[in-house]
Image: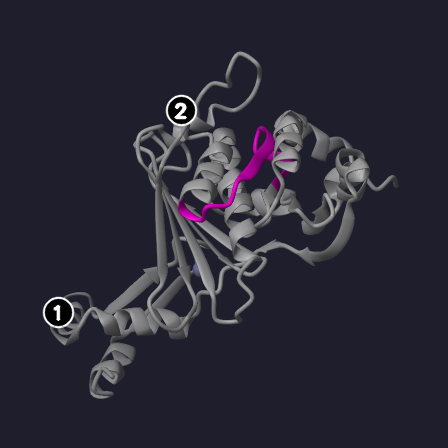
């Protein structure tokens, strides 16, 4: 069987270009998008929106090297899809969306109406939690709700790093044919000439979902950056993975406090907690709750 690009495993390819004046992340996230779509039983436009947000969040996630670090991106644009929350821990990504079943007709050019679903009035919030100390929180107003431009605006205004971001996905009747994105960032000290050249290249990436459908990551990298002193640096696998557990659910249950817990015990004789990211239900019966209360709640 021919190894079709869309069967290529999800991965990140990292590159330096222009003698190190800029760095590039090129990502394929097809399987991740498929998993999110299946888990949330999502419409095509919702899969496209979640896919773009997951790819953008993964770009931030893989930048954090600490083992304990998490990146959360929340997009709340006032659209019918409702708020989306995406968390990346390195290359592991998970997402939740309030109304993932809302479907919207495609735009006249065939692209999914992502900004129609996400909304255009609201914020993109980035929370970088290092696992120790206070998390860093950056907020930018949405530019278009298409998400690529919104991430670019975040990098430029919150992190003072001129960036080109292109995110895309092709979804047809619940099947993800391609998904991924590219991030090009100027490094400190990048010359004006290089910046201008990168700006002109931005056009190249506008059809990234189709390019990812047709070509493996390496071929795309070669085609787009070969003439820019491109050096391929490293690769990293990416995947949809939820890290919820019975233990974590128990900790959340503890955090609601003794009074509330007693009430749940008396009225419901147990508790069920369903994860928003993977829909796993963690069940606690009367004895579990009694044990939790007896443990002193600490
Ligand atoms: Zn979960």
Camera sees residue 88: yes
Residue for point 59% across, 48% down: 189
Q: Quadrant of ligand 1?
A: bottom left
Q: Which mark is residue 263?
A: 1
x and y percentages locating residue 146 in the rendered image: 46, 30
Mark 1 or 2: in front is 2
Q: Which SS class for mark 2?
A: helix
Camera sees residue 98: no
In the displayed structure image, the side of residue 27 where residue 33 appears, left or right: left
In the displayed structure image, the side of residue 70 where residue 11 appears, left or right: right
x and y percentages locating residue 48 in the rendered image: 52, 34
Q: Please tell me how crowded label 2 is: few (under 14), some (14-19), or many (20+) other residues with Cα within 10 Å.
A: many
- Name the quadrant of the C terminus: bottom left
Residue at which label 2 appears: 116
Q: Please tell me how crowded label 1 is: few (under 14), some (14-19), or many (20+) other residues with Cα within 10 Å.
A: few
In the orientation shown, which residue stands out farthest toward the right?
A: 1
In the displayed structure image, the side of residue 208 where residue 261 appears, left or right: left
What is the magenta segment's predominant secondary structure? strand
Magenta segment: 158-183
Q: Which mark is residue 102?
A: none
- Decide which of 212, 196 is in the foreground and name it: 196
């Amino acid at each position: 069987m021919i190894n079709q690009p869309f069967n290529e495993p999800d991965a990140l390819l990292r590159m330096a270009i222009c003698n190190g004046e800029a760095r590039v992340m090129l990502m394929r996230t097809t399987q991740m998008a498929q998993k999110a779509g299946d888990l949330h039983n999502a419409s095509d436009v919702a899969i496209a929106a979640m896919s773009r947000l997951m790819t953008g969040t993964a770009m931030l996630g893989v930048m954090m090297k600490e083992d304990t670090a998490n990146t959360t991106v929340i997009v709340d644009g006032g659209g019918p899809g409702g708020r989306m929350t995406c968390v990346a821990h390195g290359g592991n990504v998970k997402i939740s969306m309030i109304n993932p079943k809302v479907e919207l007709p495609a735009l006249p050019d065939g692209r999914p109406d992502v900004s129609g679903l996400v909304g255009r009035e609201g914020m993109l919030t980035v929370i970088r939690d290092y696992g120790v100390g206070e998390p860093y929180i950056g907020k930018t107003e949405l530019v278009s709700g298409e998400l690529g431009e919104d991430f670019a605006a975040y990098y430029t205004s919150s992190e003072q790093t001129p960036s080109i971001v292109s995110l895309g996905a092709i979804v047809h009747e619940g099947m993800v044919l391609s998904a991924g994105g590219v991030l090009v960032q100027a490094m400190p000290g990048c010359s004006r000439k290089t910046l201008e050249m990168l700006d002109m290249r931005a056009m190249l990436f506008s059809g990234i979902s189709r390019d990812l459908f047709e070509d493996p990551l390496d071929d795309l990298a070669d085609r787009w950056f070969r003439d820019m002193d491109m050096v391929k640096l490293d690769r990293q696998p990416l995947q949809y993975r939820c890290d919820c557990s019975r233990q974590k659910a128990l900790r959340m249950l503890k955090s609601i406090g003794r009074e509330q817990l007693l009430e749940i015990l008396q009225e419901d004789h147990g508790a069920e907690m369903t994860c928003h990211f993977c829909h796993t239900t963690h069940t606690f019966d009367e004895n579990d709750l009694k044990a939790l209360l007896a443990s002193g709640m600490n």
